[in-house]
Image: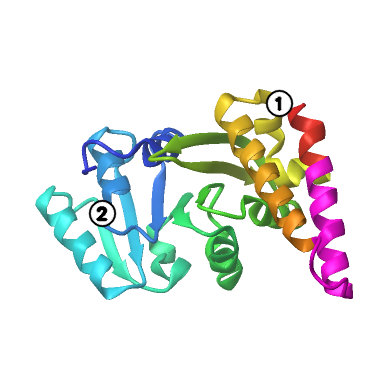
């Protein structure tokens, strides 16, 4: 992967960036995504934010190598603190973290979202937490994607402002993804169900404490939800 050729996962994230957007890529690592977006003529300007010194230095170096210092600003900052009002950011990308961490980044500096009308979020795990947050904070899902790369499966959620209603299954699995029922989607949730069934089996031999009983009920409920969708 480099600034001209992204991984399949990041290429999918890039495909949801509107032409002419001003992007803040939070947790930008080597700044591959903003560099790619500028090279492709999709955007003119971006902010690459990194909270860790090493990746921040890597991003600075990459932006300089690509000759994009005038178009991409690299900042060492915690989450959305990388965004300044003078940037006029309207699109935020956050990729490659857990869903809970992505939500905590969004919740920590809500004022930074005031000028933003699109969030493109790619959690490595716990996408449901993002859907729940969106539901509670008046963001609606306008696009979703699921991709497999190097034997890992990733979900991408694209949000814009607005209200929506989601069922419990849709919060867990994604309303658009449920409609599409792609091969990768079916593979992901078949694997999850198999994993949950193994956990259930191992709980058969555990002492039935209130915690164990609660865990069993939660797993049975999730299995029933998913099986209803995939079968």
Q: How many dots with numbers?
A: 2
Image position, residue 134 (x, y; %):
69, 52
Determine if residue 55 is in view.
yes
- Residue 58 quadrant: bottom left
Within 10 angstroms of label 2, few (less than 14), some, or many (20 or more) residues?
many
Tell me if residue 218 is in the magenta stretch: yes
Q: Which residue is mark 2?
A: 72
What residue is shown at x 57% (from left), y 41% (from top)?
158
Image position, residue 89 (x, y; %):
44, 54
Q: How is the image coloured?
A: rainbow
Lateral position of residue 35 relative to residue 225, left or right = left
Dots 2 and 1: beta carbons under 8 Å?
no
Magenta span: helix, strand or loop, mainly?
helix
Image position, residue 66 (x, y; %):
13, 47
Write the start and end of the magenta stretch as one range: 204-224
What residue is shown at x 34% (from left), y 57% (from top)?
28
């Amino acid at each position: 992967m480099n600034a001209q050729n992204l991984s399949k996962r990041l290429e999918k994230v890039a495909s949801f960036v509107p032409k002419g957007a001003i992007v803040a890529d939070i947790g930008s690592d080597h700044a591959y995504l903003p560099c790619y977006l500028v090279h492709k003529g999709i955007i003119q300007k971006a902010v690459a934010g990194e909270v860790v010194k090493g990746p921040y230095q890597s991003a600075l170096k990459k932006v300089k190598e690509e000759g994009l210092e005038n178009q991409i600003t690299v900042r060492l900052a915690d989450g959305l603190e990388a965004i300044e009002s003078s940037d006029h950011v309207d699109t935020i990308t956050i990729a490659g973290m857990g869903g809970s961490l992505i939500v905590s980044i969004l919740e920590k500096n809500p004022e930074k979202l005031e000028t933003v009308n699109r969030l493109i979020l790619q959690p490595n795990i716990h996408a449901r937490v993002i859907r729940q947050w969106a539901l509670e904070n008046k963001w609606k899902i306008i696009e979703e994607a699921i991709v497999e790369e190097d034997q890992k499966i990733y979900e991408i959620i694209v949000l814009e402002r607005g209200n929506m209603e989601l069922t419990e299954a849709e919060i867990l699995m994604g309303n658009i993804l449920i409609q599409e029922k792609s091969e990768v989607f079916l593979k992901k949730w078949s694997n999850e169900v198999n994993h949950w069934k193994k956990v259930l089996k191992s709980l058969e031999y555990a002492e039935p404490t209130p915690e164990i009983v609660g865990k069993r009920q939660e797993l049975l409920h999730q299995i029933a939800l998913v099986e209803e969708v995939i079968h």
